[in-house]
Amino acid sequence: MSVDQLRIIPRKDLPQWLDQMLSSFTVVAPTPQADYTNFKVITSGDQVDLESVNTRMSPKHLFFPKTERLFGFTTDRQQVDLDGQREDIPPRVLFGLRPCDARAVTMLDQVFDTDIFRDTSYVVRRQATTIVTLACNRLAASCFCTRLGSNPADTVGSDVIIVELPDNRLAIQPLTSKGQDLLKTADLPVSATAPDIEAFAQAIHTAQNADSTEPIDPDQLARKLTTIYESDFWDHDHQRCLACGTCTYLCPTCHCFDIADEAKDTTGQRVRNWDSCMFGLFTLHASGHNPRPVQKHRLRQRIMHKFCYTIDRYNQAFCVGCGRCVSRCPVNIDLREILNQLEDYQGG
């Protein structure tokens, strides 16, 4: 979308705009939760916290829930009746995502919404959602989006992007037809002047160049990973790993799940739950055999999946550099350091 559709509002008017959204949409936004922020449904525009660089949990649970009922069933021993009722998702706005999280949603799209496989529950949630992204004006210590070919003002996956201008104003730009429709529901006149457009362009430029770290070459990294699968490279970092799954549960692109049947007497349900390749039970066979019997193999799988298998299948690494796994790992395993070691490793 061109900058001639740019809206400019004072930052102090943001709660009023959100209140206008609430008349037509369910709005989910970062809200304070004790000493951190998480995405929650809001009832008032003044509940939103846009100061934190990133929420503790990514917004992936809004499309791919932690626990999801797939169907229920009843039986009288003669026949089984299935109840496949799905959750009704009203139109909603996912507001205040950072660009890394918006980009991550497009990666989930490649898993759950393709010509080969389409997860209907995911698709319903995705189609009902308009994504409003807030460009970052600073980077957290754990952020590394630029290493993955992104930047703090990336628009991939966003329907609207908001950029903070230096004079306590917000520049709001629609990027898709969904974004245009959202802005039509609010009293936001097209008020950008030539200096406003220049300030917007400068703010985008500043954000895009906030970190000069050289991006990784995903194809080169994938090729290297295929050659060191059985090498001694994997002999060290895993020794600290607790197999807690924090890295995968907080990750906006990890999407492993388990399916279980829960039944009592003649009724029950089939549920889908988040799972993690870092868990020992994840690959345990019914026979008792486990093809990944030690944590070394599980950490290797996580790295191989994100930086080799997804590059082969989707032509991109399934990591957006949000830094949650770095900042929340209880034993300080740093994915950035592993990437550095991979680039420097000369063994075989």
Image (cartoon, rainbow, N blue to C red):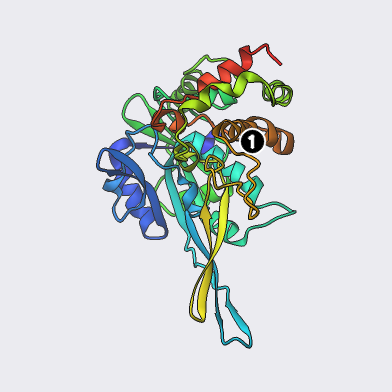
The image quadrant where one finds the N terminus is top right
197 and 137: which one is in front? 137
The image quadrant where one finds the C terminus is top right
The type of residue carrying mark 1 is His
Q: Position of residue 147 (x, y in %)?
A: 56, 22
171 and 140: which one is in front? 140
Residue 215 sits above or below residue 152 on the image: above
Q: Give the residue at x 38% y 39%.
A: 56
Quadrant housing residue 215: top right
Residue 132 visible in the picture: yes
Q: Position of residue 331 (x, y in %)?
A: 40, 28
Kindly state the secondary structure of the residue where label 1 is placed: helix
Q: Position of residue 344 (x, y in %)?
A: 62, 12
- In the image, 292: left or right of 336? right
Q: Give the residue at x 56% y 42%.
A: 277
Residue 257 sits above or below residue 297 on the image: below
Residue 246 sits above or below residue 92 on the image: above
Query: Crowding near pointer 1: few (<14 within 10 Å), some, many (20+)?
Result: some
Q: Position of residue 246 (x, y in %)?
A: 44, 39
Q: Residue furthest left?
A: 34
Residue 174 visible in the picture: no
Total numbered badges shown on the rendered structure = 1
- In the image, 317: left or right of 191? right
Q: Give the residue at x 74% y 22%.
A: 227
Q: Which residue is mark 1?
A: 305
Residue 114 sits above or below residue 11 on the image: below
Q: Give the residue at x 70% y 55%.
A: 117
